[in-house]
Amino acid sequence: MKKTLGAIAAITCVLAAGTAFAANPNYVKLSGKYTKVGDMEVTNQVELDSDEGYGFGAAIGRHIEWFKIEAEIATQESDINNFEVNGKSGRSFYSGDTRIDSLLLNAYFDVPVAGDWSVYAGGGAGAAIVTFSAYDYDIDETVFAYKFAAGVTYAFTDNFGTELGYEYLATEDIGYDHIEVKDIYSSNIVLSLKFMF
């Protein structure tokens, strides 16, 4: 009997949280990102190491029961701090950065867990303009991009909430004039403010 009552109480909490989403299914959010671009490879000989960077984003979306779908525009930038040539390291890089401007369509599972808390996981795909700058050399190319993300959401009220999560953002390789930049990906911590209506 106690197990049955506990199960009923848990289901009631989940349905109550789901009802809160249903009352305000649409949302917009603004995000700030702490970013870390992985080691990139240039023409199979040079490996680049990047500093931590920053980014910003905005999205508009809709909750559909335990799912949410959104369109997101974002930008991020990281400086290049050193490089290795054929495995030889210790060289400083005084002028260089990588910028990723992305437009993605994202879809997530978004499951209420307790009270005003929920957890989400999913990913997205779209396009990104990747700009690679090193000294006086620039590559600027639009390529396919995708991401995986997971995190937690907390609703302060029916209209305002926040999200904290991790995302893995990656793009296709870019190249110009016999120079190719490979392994373009970034691990990001994302904090968002969310307005639901």
Image (cartoon, rainbow, N blue to C red):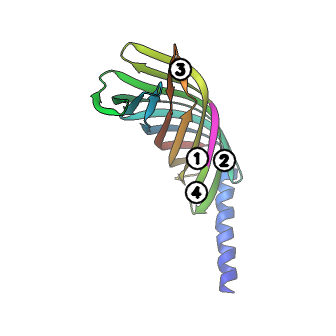
Looking at this view, is 130 or 20 the one in front? 130
In the image: residue 153, left or right of residue 48: right
Q: Which residue is mark 2?
A: 24
**Residue 25 visible in the snapshot:** no
Residue 164 percent coordinates (x, y): 49, 49
Tell me the residue at 56%/29% (across/down): 102
Question: Which of the two marks, 1 or 3, is nearer to us in this view?
Answer: 3
Question: Which of the two marks, 3 or 2, is nearer to us in this view?
Answer: 3
Q: Residues within 10 Å of mark 2 (few under 14, many from 20)?
A: some
Amino acid type indicated by mark 2: Asn
Amino acid type indicated by mark 4: Ser
Q: CA distance from mark 1 to mark 3?
A: 45 Å
Residue numbers of the magenta segment: 122-126
**Residue 20 is drawn in which quadrant?**
bottom right
Contact? badges 1 and 2 (CB < 8 Å) = yes
Dot 4 falls on a residue whose secondary structure is strand
Q: Quadrant of the C terminus?
A: top right
Q: Which mark is residue 159?
A: 1
Could you tell which of marks 1 and 3 lies nearer the N-terminus?
1
The residue sitting at the bottom extreme is: 1
Q: CA distance from mark 1 to mark 2?
A: 7 Å
Q: CA distance from mark 4 to mark 2?
A: 15 Å
Q: Which residue is mark 4?
A: 118
Could you tell which of marks 4 and 2 lies nearer the N-terminus?
2
Looking at this view, is 151 or 144 the one in front? 144
Q: Which residue is mark 3?
A: 175
Q: Residues within 10 Å of mark 4 (few under 14, many from 20)?
A: many
In the image: residue 101, left or right of residue 26: left
Tell me the residue at 55%/27% (across/down): 173
